[in-house]
Image: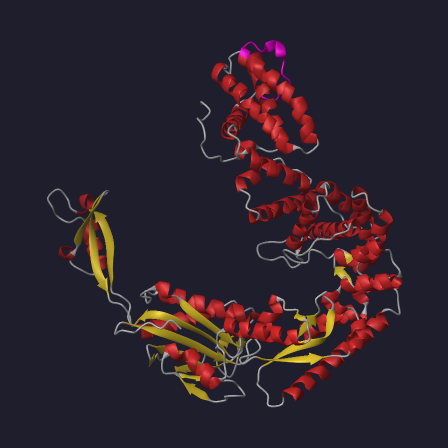
Amino acid sequence: MNARPSSDSVGNLLIEIGTEELPAKSLLRLGQNFAVRCQKGLADAGLLQDPSLGYRWFATPRRLAVWIGAVRKKQPDQQIMRRGPALVAAFDQSGQPTAAALGFARSCGIDIAQLSRSKTDKGEWLVHRVTKRGRNASTLIPQCIDEAVKRLPISKRMRWGDGMAEFVRPVHWLVILHDKQPVSARLMSVEADIYTHGHRFHCNRRLRLTSPDRYEEILRGQGFVIPDFMERRQRIVKQVRRLARRVEGEAIMDVDLLNEVTGLVEWPQSVLGAFDKAFLKVPSEALISSMRDHQKYFPIKDARGRLLPHFITVNNIKSKRPKQIRAGNERVLHARLSDARFFWDTDRGASLSSRIDSLKQILFHSKLGSVHAKVLRLQTLSATVGDLLNTDVSNCKRAALLSKADLVTEMVNEFPELQGVMGRYYAKHDGEHPDVAAALEEHYRPRYSGDRLPRHAVGQAVAVADRIDTLVGIFAAGEEPSGDKDPYGLRRAAIGVLRILIEKRRNLDLKLLLQASARIYSTQPEPVAVSGAVVDRVFDFLLERLRAYYADDGYRMDDFNAVLATRPSSPLDFDKRLRAVARFRKLPQAEYLSEANKRIRNILRRAEDNEISTVDAGLLRERAEQNLLKTLTELTESVGTQFLSGEYNRGLKRLASLKQPIDRFFDQVLVMDEDPGLRRNRLALLRQVEDLFLRVADISQLNIEKQSKRVKS
C-alpha cells in the first residue's frame, strides 16, 4: 500500500468486517461498494486531508476491508455564519433595533450587541458567527461504517443470534485501526479490535494487526490469505493458463465465472483434471454447462475451438496430496457428465414434435394461456414476418411450432440455460430442415446486451414474432413495466426486436406487426382482447427504447427527437433518417433552415386560418414567394422520390438549396397580410415547406451551434 508517514493530526485507516462465507457472485460488487461508501462518508465528514490519496479495497470469502490514506484524527473547526434581517430592516430611523433584529438575536441565544454585520453586493445584513468545534474521528468513523453497511446493495439481509443486527452474512470480527490505534466501536453485534483472522484451514487463528499499512503483508505472510480481489483473480488467471498449456489447450474463462471463482477462494491453488473422451459425444454446451455452472470448473478447448477432455478446478487449500484432490474432482465431474449423457440419450428417444402437447402444462401467463397457446400464435405471426422477409414461410411456421418444445426435455429441465441450444441439437437429430433447427436456438438471441443476433432469416422471423407476442400480450394484461420493475424483461425484448430490424437491415413496419399480433390474440380459441390503445402504448414503448440505443452510439438527443417527432413505424427507416439528420446538421445551411422551420412552426401555430395547404399560384404577387413556390415544386418531385426510396441523406442535401428562397421570402413578403386570401395562401406555402422537411424529421428541434446570422424576426 502507498503508506504515508502519519503525523499527530492524520493517519491511515483500516476497516475490516470478518464474516461467514460471503456470496461469491456478488463479492466483487460488495467489496467495491463498501470501500466507495466508507471513503465518501469520511470525505463528507471532513476527515480526509487529501482525497487524492484514494483508497484500496479488499474482499475475500470471509472479509470486506478498505484502507484509506491520510484520515484526520479530528474534524477541522467550522466557521458558521447565520444571516439575519437586512440592516435597513434591523434598525428604525432612530437607530433602535426592530422586532426583527431582536427576534433574530433571541433565536441565536445572544444579545443584539454580539451580532456582526456582513456586506454583500445586495446589501448589508445582521449575521451571527460561531465556531463549531470539530468532532473526534474516533466518534465519526464508526458512524461512517454503519452508514456504509446500511447502504450496501444487499438484496436479502440475515440476522443471527439473539440480536437485531443485519448483514449479508453473520459477522464474527471487526477491525478499525487508525494510525496504529484501535477505534472503539460496537457494530453489527461485534466489538471492534485489532485482530484479524487468517485462512480457515492453513491459519485458523487470530492475527494481530499493528498498522493499517501492514494489513496485506500480515495476511499474506502469516494468514495464507490474498486479500486483494484483483490480485487473487490475476493469480488464478496465470495458474489456469499455465495448466491449460500443459494439454495444448486454452481455458474457457468468461468474466462471470472468473469473478465467482475468485470469490470462493482466499489462497487459490489450481488443479488440472481429465474426464473420459467418450463424453465428448454429448453436445459440448451440455458438458461446458456441467463444468462451468455446476462445478465452477474451467473447461479447456483446442486451437480449433473443440472441447478437450480436461478441466481446471481452483481449490482454496494447498494440499499435500494433490493427486487425491484431482481424483476427487474427477469422480464428481464423472457423475455430472454421466447425468448429461443420460439426458442426451433419453431425450433423443422422442421427437420434438411429439412433445408439443406437453407445453399445455406450462403456463405462459395467467391471462394469456399456456406456452402451447403461445407457440400456436407464433406460428401465425412468424409466417407474417417471414413473408415480409421473403423467406420460406413453411420453415418459419415449423420453427415457431417447435420453438419451445425443448422446455419439456430432461436436459433443459436440468440445465435451463440450454433452452434453444438443445432444441437445435434435437431438431437436427429429428431430421428437421437446417434453417428450422438453427432458428430454435437463434430465436432466443439477443439474450443480453451486446449478444449476437440471429444470422438466418427464419431465426430472425421467429425471434421478432416471439418478442412482439410477449410485448403485446403482457401490455394487454396490464403489466407493462413501471419504474425499475420489469419482471417479464419487456425492455430487453423491445431492444431485441429493434436491434434485429436495424442491425440486420430488415425494413419491417412495427405498427403492422403489432396490429397483426393483436388480431391473432383476438382470434385464438380463448380470445384475449387487445385494444388499439394497447397497440399504441407498445409502439410508443418500442420507439422510446431507441433513445438509449442511439445515446450509447453517441447520437445527439436533439437529432433523435427531430426524427422521433415524425414517428416512423419502421426502425430501419428511423435509423436512416437519424443518420441523415446527423449529417445534415453539419451543412452550412443547417442552422438557418432549422431556425427558419422554428419560425414557420410558430407562425402556423399562431395563425387561425392555416388549414388550407393548397397554394394558388395566381395569388402569389411577390417575386420572392413565386420563386419559393417554384423551387419548392421542383424539389418536391425529385426529393420526394429520394425520400420514398429511403435516400434521406441525398434528399436533405437537396433541401439545403431552400435557404436562399426562404431567406428572401421572409425579407420581402409579409405573411400575415390584411387580405385574408393572400394571408391564407402564404400560410399554405409555408405549410408545404414544413411538410416537405417533415418527410424526414422535424428539423426545428435541432440545436445547431451558431454558424451564421439568425433568421430575422
Query: In this rendering, would 113 be left or right of 573?
Result: left
Residue 192 location in percent, x, y?
40, 81
Decide which of 361, 245 is in the foreground and name it.
Answer: 245
Residue 540 location in percent, x, y?
64, 44
When asked about the image quadrant of residue 612, the answer is: top right
Residue 604 location in percent, x, y?
55, 24
Q: Is residue 340 above or below residue 446?
A: below
Q: Is residue 491 above or below residue 309?
A: above
Residue at the farthest left position:
94
Colour scheme shown: secondary structure
The secondary structure making up most of the magenta span is loop
Task: Give the residues drawn in magenta, as a range.
Answer: 610-623
Residue at horizontal 80%, vertical 48%? 381
When asked about the image quadrant of residue 217, the answer is: bottom left
Q: Is residue 468 above or below residue 52?
A: above
Query: In this rendering, would 704 be left or right of 134?
Result: right
